[in-house]
Image (tube, coloured by chain):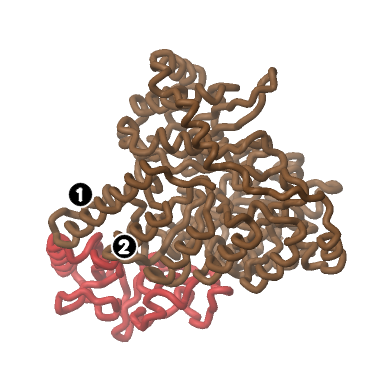
Chain colours: A brown, B red
Amino acid sequence: MYRYDEFDARFVNERVGQLRDQVERRLKGEITEEEFRPLRLMNGLYLQLHAYMLRVAVPYGTLSSRQLHRLADIATKYDKGYAHFTTRQNIQYNWPKLEDVPEILSDLAEVEMHAIQTSGNCIRNVTSDQWAGAAADEIADPRPICELIRQWSSLHPEFCYLPRKFKIAVTGSPHDRAAVKFHDIGLRMHRNYKGAPGYEVLVGGGLGRTPMIGITVREWLAEEELLAYLEAIMRVYNSLGRRDNKYKARIKILVHETGHDEFRRLVDEEHAKIEAPAVLPDPRELTRIEAYFAEPQYEDLAEQDAGYNKALATSKDFANWVKSNVAKHKKPGYAIANISLKPEGGIPGDATDKQMHGLADLAETYSFAEIRVTHEQNLVLPYVRKSDLSDLWQKLQALELAPANLGLMTDIIVCPGLDYCALATARSIPVAQELTNRFASLERQHDIGTLRLKISGCINACGHHHVGHIGILGVDRKGEEIYQITLGGSADENASIGKIIGPGFTGDEISDAVETVVDTYLDIRQKDEPFIDTYRRVGKDPFKEALYATA
Amino acid sequence: MSAQILTANILRTGLVVFLAQDHSWSEKVDEAAVANTEEDAKALEAKGVEDKIANLIVDPYLVDVIVEDGKIKATHIRERIRTLGPSVHLDHGKQAEGTAGQFMPVDGGGQTSSAQAKIARGKRT
């Protein structure tokens, strides 16, 4: 399982000491807020609408039971008994006091956790496929490369003051669960014509106020060449990226304004200048990193399990949960159990301290003490024996962690919105709550099939609305919350950006509008055609007509 | 001009506060000093800057309000949520701690549970 080495442990402890000193000096008034702000942001500490907010990194979405217990303890001890899993595989606390933050970071450091690279204009913590190391369709576990990038990027002196934040995602599977086309750099593992695994390098994707799909700058790059190439991209960005305008500072704007071919040429030119050995990872180091992500001690199991099959046949509720929430594992007899944090009427991504402790215990019993966090704000137990699934499901029910809606209409990505966020222009959580109530019927959701709904409470698009099959964007129109609908977005390997369908709706109208879109789809779909395929076949006109035709 | 009050966050805790008549910082919006003239608003701002420099508070700024029956209601929904707490967690924030503005719910009804929180219209009234 992933762990820090002694260098990381020392570095994280030093950082806790530094922040403790900085907070002390701030409270004594020895440094001003203007001086302190960048320091707190380097440690994931924001000031939000009601209070400070602390964002803690979950590297590559991987947590041990011990770490999840500790995250729960922090929620009890320093917060209000709950926390929020974010759209970047992180976890946020909504109510920490500044004076407590050094203690919180010290408690985190004890379990090899921190809040570094969760904020500020640096290379943010790398995200990946939540099923890494377990997925049946995977070429190889992408996390060792994530960790290599992390070691290279943490405190890299050249990249601590970038024009803007910089996000990297890596997938090791052909089916992209990490949205790599919507990151500053996306890495997609695939095999070249010789069958050797390497990476397609995508640059300049992103959401926010200017959504863009990343362009391919290299079709295939061998693992050992990766860091030098990334360094070349970063250098081009660092020297040419705009610093005059915050809204034009991301690399996607540079790629767009420079032109794709010219950008590729600049990167290649920079790459040619780099002395390869300086950024060439030592093979021994790679081996050492890979050992951190070694497979758990699997048992040799038969693919079929009689008890599991019987439970499937006898309990419709269990079968429904398996249908949506359980994914195929690469090892016979094992399964990936996805834990939906999207209960009917609940707050997407929130978990209580009790739920976190409970799930940490279940991971200990059923999943080699390992939990994953997804960018879709759910959790995963990645290594569950099929024979244990029924027991696990019953225990999840007791924790209210068994919604059977993964990948369905009510598995909604939602940013915190105006209920918590200082930047938000409208609330987003209440929209999700109303929609999960309205579409609660599983039968109806199964009929609708795969439909990705995503909601953001402002143009910064933390709720990924641009890539929702149905996206909702909340804006402020003269003090009133207005919700725009976009249709046709997709975050996976067939990436697309949703288009605004027409004038927005009030809070009272938005659920009806979404229902109209869904009903229109049900009317015009062909047999077994998912929503996104129907939309791509017919375009937006039928939906527009249904939404805006005057009676 | 609209009536205005001054809000900020306490440096040490992050709590949302309002500048009161006696120049202390209160968690209760209803205790805020209301400025009805630009001159009064400037005086509030000046006190905010002073207490910012004194490291008591951070991010002071003026907020438009209306006053009815001695109760203060922030005009904009963002600021109203700030005087109450999250509309989706009525068990947290000022609304749960007895320090909320007396114009209770964001949506004007008052009985919504977090599970059924209605989307309020943040219309200026």
Q: Where does residue A43 sit, x and y in percent of width and height? A: 33, 51
Seen at 58% across and 42% down, the residue is A294
Q: Look at mark 1 in the image and give the residue it sits on.
A: A35
Q: Where does residue B48 sit, x and y in percent of width and height? A: 17, 65
Q: How many marks?
A: 2
Dot label at residue A12: none
Q: Is residue A157 above or below residue A376?
A: above
Q: Look at mark 2 in the image and give the residue it sits on.
A: A103
Are there few (<14), some (14-19), or many (20+) residues within 10 Å of tag 2? some
Q: Chain of mark 1?
A: A
For the residue pair A106 and A24, the one nearer the viewer reads as A106
Q: Chain of mark 2?
A: A
Are there few (<14), some (14-19), or many (20+) residues within 10 Å of tag 1? few
Q: Secondary structure at mark 1?
A: helix
Instruction: Check the picture and name the quadrant holding the C terminus of chain A.
Output: bottom right
Report whether residue B1 is seen.
Answer: no
Residue A387 falls in image quadrant: bottom right
A157 sits to left or right of B112: left
Q: Where does residue A364 sit, x and y in percent of width and height? A: 59, 61
Q: Where does residue A91 sit, x and y in percent of width and height? A: 47, 57
- Three-letter amino acid code at the position of disc 2: Glu
B63 sits to left or right of A475: left
For the residue pair A147 and A526, the one nearer the viewer reads as A147
Q: Is residue A416 above or below residue A470?
A: below
Seen at 60% across and 51% down, the residue is A471
Q: CA distance from mark 2 to mark 1?
A: 21 Å
N-terminal of the two: label 2 or label 1? 1
Q: Secondary structure at mark 2?
A: helix
